[in-house]
Amino acid sequence: MTDIARGDVARGVVARGVVAKILPFSAVDGPGNRAVVFLQGCDFDCRYCHNPETRALCVHCGLCVPACPAGALSLEGGRVRWDAARCVSCGACIAACPHGSSPKAVSMTVAEVLSSIDRYKPFLSGVTVSGGECGLQPAFLEALLVEARAAGLPGLVDTNGSADFSSLPGVVAAAEGFMLDVKAWDETEHRALTGAPNRAVVANLRFLAAAGKLYEVRTVVVPGQFDAALTVRETARTLVAAGSGARYKIIRFRPQGVRAAWRGLPTPDDATMGALAAIALREGVREVVVV
Protein backbone atom coordinates (compact mmCIF):
# COMPACT_ATOMS: atom_id res chain seq x y z
CA MET A 1 0.00 0.00 0.00
CA THR A 2 1.38 3.39 -0.99
CA ASP A 3 2.14 5.40 2.14
CA ILE A 4 4.83 7.44 3.89
CA ALA A 5 5.88 7.81 7.49
CA ARG A 6 3.66 10.08 9.55
CA GLY A 7 6.60 12.35 10.31
CA ASP A 8 6.93 13.13 6.61
CA VAL A 9 3.70 15.13 6.78
CA ALA A 10 5.26 17.59 9.22
CA ARG A 11 8.45 17.74 7.16
CA GLY A 12 6.55 18.75 4.05
CA VAL A 13 7.16 15.57 2.06
CA VAL A 14 4.50 15.17 -0.63
CA ALA A 15 2.12 12.44 0.50
CA ARG A 16 0.70 10.10 -2.10
CA GLY A 17 -2.24 7.75 -1.74
CA VAL A 18 -3.83 5.03 -3.81
CA VAL A 19 -7.26 6.41 -4.73
CA ALA A 20 -10.02 4.11 -5.99
CA LYS A 21 -12.39 6.87 -7.10
CA ILE A 22 -13.67 10.32 -6.24
CA LEU A 23 -17.32 11.35 -6.15
CA PRO A 24 -17.72 15.11 -6.51
CA PHE A 25 -21.15 15.06 -4.84
CA SER A 26 -22.84 12.89 -2.21
CA ALA A 27 -25.77 13.59 0.09
CA VAL A 28 -25.44 10.32 2.05
CA ASP A 29 -21.82 10.37 3.25
CA GLY A 30 -22.06 12.90 6.05
CA PRO A 31 -23.88 16.18 6.66
CA GLY A 32 -24.65 18.37 3.68
CA ASN A 33 -23.33 17.84 0.18
CA ARG A 34 -19.86 16.30 0.26
CA ALA A 35 -17.14 15.11 -2.06
CA VAL A 36 -16.12 11.53 -1.27
CA VAL A 37 -12.59 10.19 -1.75
CA PHE A 38 -12.45 6.39 -1.79
CA LEU A 39 -9.00 4.98 -0.98
CA GLN A 40 -7.97 1.59 -2.33
CA GLY A 41 -7.33 -1.34 -0.01
CA CYS A 42 -9.19 -2.94 2.89
CA ASP A 43 -8.25 -5.40 5.62
CA PHE A 44 -11.81 -6.71 6.01
CA ASP A 45 -13.53 -9.08 3.59
CA CYS A 46 -17.17 -8.46 4.42
CA ARG A 47 -19.63 -10.86 2.88
CA TYR A 48 -21.99 -8.02 2.02
CA CYS A 49 -19.30 -5.59 0.80
CA HIS A 50 -20.86 -3.06 -1.58
CA ASN A 51 -17.50 -1.89 -2.95
CA PRO A 52 -15.61 -5.20 -3.34
CA GLU A 53 -13.36 -3.76 -6.05
CA THR A 54 -11.72 -1.48 -3.46
CA ARG A 55 -10.36 -4.31 -1.32
CA ALA A 56 -7.01 -4.98 -2.97
CA LEU A 57 -4.34 -3.48 -5.18
CA CYS A 58 -4.22 -4.46 -8.84
CA VAL A 59 -1.89 -7.42 -9.51
CA HIS A 60 -1.74 -6.58 -13.25
CA CYS A 61 -2.90 -10.02 -14.35
CA GLY A 62 -4.50 -8.47 -17.46
CA LEU A 63 -7.80 -10.35 -17.25
CA CYS A 64 -9.71 -7.07 -17.33
CA VAL A 65 -8.11 -5.86 -20.57
CA PRO A 66 -10.14 -7.93 -23.08
CA ALA A 67 -13.29 -7.34 -21.02
CA CYS A 68 -13.21 -3.57 -21.63
CA PRO A 69 -15.62 -2.71 -24.49
CA ALA A 70 -14.23 0.82 -24.84
CA GLY A 71 -10.59 -0.17 -25.25
CA ALA A 72 -9.65 1.91 -22.21
CA LEU A 73 -7.34 -0.77 -20.80
CA SER A 74 -4.08 -2.11 -22.17
CA LEU A 75 -1.24 -4.30 -20.92
CA GLU A 76 2.09 -2.55 -21.31
CA GLY A 77 5.34 -3.81 -19.84
CA GLY A 78 3.49 -6.25 -17.62
CA ARG A 79 1.24 -3.55 -16.14
CA VAL A 80 -2.38 -2.68 -16.83
CA ARG A 81 -2.79 0.87 -18.10
CA TRP A 82 -6.08 2.74 -17.81
CA ASP A 83 -7.02 5.49 -20.26
CA ALA A 84 -9.51 7.66 -18.36
CA ALA A 85 -10.44 9.57 -21.50
CA ARG A 86 -11.73 6.42 -23.20
CA CYS A 87 -13.40 4.91 -20.12
CA VAL A 88 -17.21 4.82 -20.15
CA SER A 89 -17.50 3.57 -16.53
CA CYS A 90 -19.46 0.48 -17.57
CA GLY A 91 -17.98 -1.70 -14.80
CA ALA A 92 -16.93 -4.54 -17.10
CA CYS A 93 -13.36 -4.46 -15.73
CA ILE A 94 -14.64 -4.75 -12.18
CA ALA A 95 -16.82 -7.72 -13.08
CA ALA A 96 -13.89 -9.44 -14.78
CA CYS A 97 -11.44 -9.01 -11.87
CA PRO A 98 -11.13 -12.07 -9.61
CA HIS A 99 -8.88 -10.29 -7.12
CA GLY A 100 -11.19 -7.71 -5.49
CA SER A 101 -9.42 -4.87 -7.24
CA SER A 102 -9.75 -2.26 -9.97
CA PRO A 103 -7.41 -1.22 -12.77
CA LYS A 104 -8.67 2.33 -12.30
CA ALA A 105 -7.10 2.92 -8.86
CA VAL A 106 -4.40 5.57 -9.21
CA SER A 107 -1.63 7.08 -7.10
CA MET A 108 -2.42 10.72 -6.34
CA THR A 109 -1.06 13.56 -4.26
CA VAL A 110 -3.26 15.54 -1.90
CA ALA A 111 -3.02 18.51 -4.26
CA GLU A 112 -4.25 16.37 -7.15
CA VAL A 113 -7.21 15.14 -5.13
CA LEU A 114 -8.24 18.62 -4.07
CA SER A 115 -7.70 19.98 -7.58
CA SER A 116 -10.09 17.37 -8.96
CA ILE A 117 -12.95 18.71 -6.82
CA ASP A 118 -11.99 22.39 -6.83
CA ARG A 119 -14.64 23.46 -9.33
CA TYR A 120 -17.36 21.93 -7.13
CA LYS A 121 -16.13 23.64 -3.97
CA PRO A 122 -18.83 26.37 -3.85
CA PHE A 123 -21.46 23.61 -3.57
CA LEU A 124 -19.69 21.42 -1.00
CA SER A 125 -20.05 21.21 2.78
CA GLY A 126 -16.88 19.18 3.14
CA VAL A 127 -15.00 16.03 2.16
CA THR A 128 -15.51 12.46 3.34
CA VAL A 129 -12.58 10.04 3.06
CA SER A 130 -13.75 6.47 2.67
CA GLY A 131 -12.60 3.22 1.04
CA GLY A 132 -11.74 0.43 1.09
CA GLU A 133 -10.35 1.36 4.45
CA CYS A 134 -8.79 4.80 4.57
CA GLY A 135 -7.05 4.06 7.88
CA LEU A 136 -4.59 1.83 6.02
CA GLN A 137 -3.04 4.95 4.47
CA PRO A 138 -2.70 7.11 7.61
CA ALA A 139 -0.10 9.59 6.38
CA PHE A 140 -2.03 10.36 3.23
CA LEU A 141 -5.28 10.49 5.20
CA GLU A 142 -3.82 13.00 7.66
CA ALA A 143 -2.35 15.17 4.92
CA LEU A 144 -5.60 15.16 2.98
CA LEU A 145 -7.64 16.13 6.05
CA VAL A 146 -5.21 18.93 6.95
CA GLU A 147 -5.14 20.42 3.45
CA ALA A 148 -8.88 20.00 2.90
CA ARG A 149 -9.58 21.88 6.12
CA ALA A 150 -7.20 24.64 5.05
CA ALA A 151 -9.14 24.86 1.79
CA GLY A 152 -12.42 25.32 3.67
CA LEU A 153 -13.57 21.72 3.30
CA PRO A 154 -13.78 19.97 6.71
CA GLY A 155 -13.18 16.24 6.47
CA LEU A 156 -14.99 13.22 7.84
CA VAL A 157 -13.33 9.81 8.14
CA ASP A 158 -15.48 6.84 7.07
CA THR A 159 -13.84 3.77 8.63
CA ASN A 160 -14.26 0.11 9.50
CA GLY A 161 -12.38 0.83 12.73
CA SER A 162 -9.46 -1.55 12.16
CA ALA A 163 -6.80 1.16 12.52
CA ASP A 164 -5.81 2.25 16.03
CA PHE A 165 -6.89 5.88 15.90
CA SER A 166 -5.73 6.46 19.45
CA SER A 167 -2.20 6.15 18.06
CA LEU A 168 -2.92 8.57 15.20
CA PRO A 169 -3.46 11.90 16.99
CA GLY A 170 -2.77 13.89 13.82
CA VAL A 171 -5.60 12.17 11.99
CA VAL A 172 -7.98 12.60 14.93
CA ALA A 173 -7.12 16.29 15.32
CA ALA A 174 -7.48 17.02 11.60
CA ALA A 175 -10.80 15.22 11.19
CA GLU A 176 -14.12 16.97 11.62
CA GLY A 177 -15.47 13.64 12.83
CA PHE A 178 -15.64 9.91 12.23
CA MET A 179 -18.25 7.60 10.74
CA LEU A 180 -17.59 4.17 12.27
CA ASP A 181 -18.98 0.80 11.17
CA VAL A 182 -19.78 -1.65 13.94
CA LYS A 183 -20.50 -4.76 11.92
CA ALA A 184 -21.00 -7.32 14.72
CA TRP A 185 -20.43 -7.18 18.46
CA ASP A 186 -19.64 -10.85 19.02
CA GLU A 187 -16.01 -11.63 18.13
CA THR A 188 -16.76 -14.98 16.51
CA GLU A 189 -19.61 -13.57 14.45
CA HIS A 190 -17.47 -10.62 13.37
CA ARG A 191 -14.73 -12.96 12.14
CA ALA A 192 -17.24 -15.05 10.20
CA LEU A 193 -18.78 -11.94 8.64
CA THR A 194 -15.59 -10.01 7.83
CA GLY A 195 -12.64 -12.38 8.14
CA ALA A 196 -11.14 -10.14 10.82
CA PRO A 197 -11.37 -9.57 14.61
CA ASN A 198 -13.30 -6.65 16.08
CA ARG A 199 -11.22 -5.73 19.13
CA ALA A 200 -9.87 -2.62 17.40
CA VAL A 201 -13.38 -1.64 16.29
CA VAL A 202 -14.75 -1.75 19.82
CA ALA A 203 -11.68 0.10 21.13
CA ASN A 204 -12.17 2.81 18.51
CA LEU A 205 -15.85 3.06 19.36
CA ARG A 206 -14.98 3.78 22.98
CA PHE A 207 -12.05 6.08 22.20
CA LEU A 208 -13.78 8.19 19.54
CA ALA A 209 -17.01 8.40 21.53
CA ALA A 210 -15.17 9.61 24.64
CA ALA A 211 -13.16 12.08 22.53
CA GLY A 212 -16.34 13.60 21.10
CA LYS A 213 -15.20 12.73 17.58
CA LEU A 214 -17.96 10.38 16.49
CA TYR A 215 -20.43 11.82 14.01
CA GLU A 216 -22.15 8.54 13.20
CA VAL A 217 -22.05 4.83 14.00
CA ARG A 218 -23.51 2.36 11.52
CA THR A 219 -24.57 -1.27 11.49
CA VAL A 220 -25.68 -3.08 8.34
CA VAL A 221 -28.36 -5.63 9.23
CA VAL A 222 -28.12 -8.99 7.43
CA PRO A 223 -30.54 -11.54 8.93
CA GLY A 224 -28.93 -14.81 9.97
CA GLN A 225 -25.34 -13.55 9.74
CA PHE A 226 -24.93 -12.14 13.26
CA ASP A 227 -26.88 -11.15 16.36
CA ALA A 228 -28.10 -7.72 15.32
CA ALA A 229 -30.01 -7.09 18.55
CA LEU A 230 -26.87 -7.72 20.63
CA THR A 231 -24.79 -5.51 18.34
CA VAL A 232 -27.22 -2.61 18.44
CA ARG A 233 -27.75 -2.85 22.19
CA GLU A 234 -24.06 -2.98 23.12
CA THR A 235 -23.09 -0.29 20.63
CA ALA A 236 -25.86 1.97 21.94
CA ARG A 237 -24.81 1.38 25.54
CA THR A 238 -21.22 2.28 24.70
CA LEU A 239 -22.28 5.53 23.04
CA VAL A 240 -24.49 6.55 25.93
CA ALA A 241 -21.92 5.61 28.58
CA ALA A 242 -19.41 7.90 26.86
CA GLY A 243 -21.90 10.76 26.66
CA SER A 244 -21.65 10.74 22.88
CA GLY A 245 -24.22 12.56 20.79
CA ALA A 246 -23.39 10.50 17.70
CA ARG A 247 -26.31 9.27 15.72
CA TYR A 248 -26.81 5.57 15.09
CA LYS A 249 -27.63 4.62 11.52
CA ILE A 250 -29.13 1.14 11.18
CA ILE A 251 -28.89 0.07 7.56
CA ARG A 252 -30.97 -2.53 5.76
CA PHE A 253 -28.85 -4.93 3.67
CA ARG A 254 -29.33 -4.49 -0.07
CA PRO A 255 -27.81 -6.78 -2.72
CA GLN A 256 -26.77 -4.06 -5.18
CA GLY A 257 -23.04 -4.18 -5.87
CA VAL A 258 -22.48 -7.25 -3.69
CA ARG A 259 -20.42 -10.15 -5.03
CA ALA A 260 -22.46 -12.88 -6.73
CA ALA A 261 -21.87 -15.44 -3.98
CA TRP A 262 -23.58 -13.22 -1.42
CA ARG A 263 -26.35 -11.51 -3.40
CA GLY A 264 -28.86 -14.02 -2.08
CA LEU A 265 -28.47 -12.88 1.51
CA PRO A 266 -31.89 -11.90 2.93
CA THR A 267 -33.06 -8.32 3.35
CA PRO A 268 -34.53 -7.52 6.77
CA ASP A 269 -38.19 -6.54 6.95
CA ASP A 270 -39.63 -3.35 8.42
CA ALA A 271 -40.54 -5.03 11.70
CA THR A 272 -36.95 -6.17 12.26
CA MET A 273 -35.55 -2.74 11.51
CA GLY A 274 -38.11 -1.04 13.74
CA ALA A 275 -37.33 -3.37 16.63
CA LEU A 276 -33.60 -2.65 16.33
CA ALA A 277 -34.21 1.08 16.27
CA ALA A 278 -36.35 0.74 19.39
CA ILE A 279 -33.48 -1.01 21.19
CA ALA A 280 -31.09 1.85 20.46
CA LEU A 281 -33.64 4.44 21.56
CA ARG A 282 -34.39 2.56 24.79
CA GLU A 283 -30.70 2.53 25.60
CA GLY A 284 -30.64 6.32 25.33
CA VAL A 285 -29.24 7.06 21.87
CA ARG A 286 -30.45 10.54 20.93
CA GLU A 287 -30.83 10.03 17.20
CA VAL A 288 -31.49 6.79 15.35
CA VAL A 289 -31.79 6.65 11.56
CA VAL A 290 -33.12 3.61 9.71
CA VAL A 291 -32.34 3.34 6.01
Image (tube, rainbow, N blue to C red):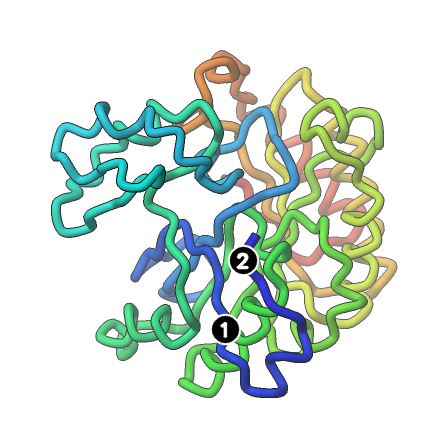
Q: Position of residue 18 (x, y in %)?
A: 46, 56
* Whole-percent x, y for residue 235 in the image: 78, 46
Q: Amino acid at mark 2?
A: Thr
> Could you tell me which residue is drawn at 35 percent across and 57 percent down?
22
Q: Nearer the viewer, residue 130 or 58?
A: 58
Residue 236 visible, this angle: no
Quadrant assignment, res 244: bottom right
Residue drawn at point x = 27 percent, y = 32 percent: 91
Q: Given the image, on which type of amino acid does mark 1 rest?
A: Leu
Instruction: Bin the neighbour count of mark 2 within 10 Å (Cα to Cα): few under 14, some 14-19, many 20 and up.
Output: some
> What is the residue that sits farthest to the right in this orientation?
241
* Image side of residue 241 versus residue 193, left or right: right
Question: Of the numbered discs in the image, which one, if any, rests on residue 2?
Answer: 2
Q: Secondary structure at mark 1?
A: helix
Q: Position of residue 216 (x, y in %)?
A: 62, 57
* Residue ID for mark 1: 144
Q: Is residue 177 left or right of residue 22?
A: right
- What residue is at 76 percent from the left and 28 percent from the top? 191
Q: Earlier in the sequence, mark 2 or mark 1?
A: 2
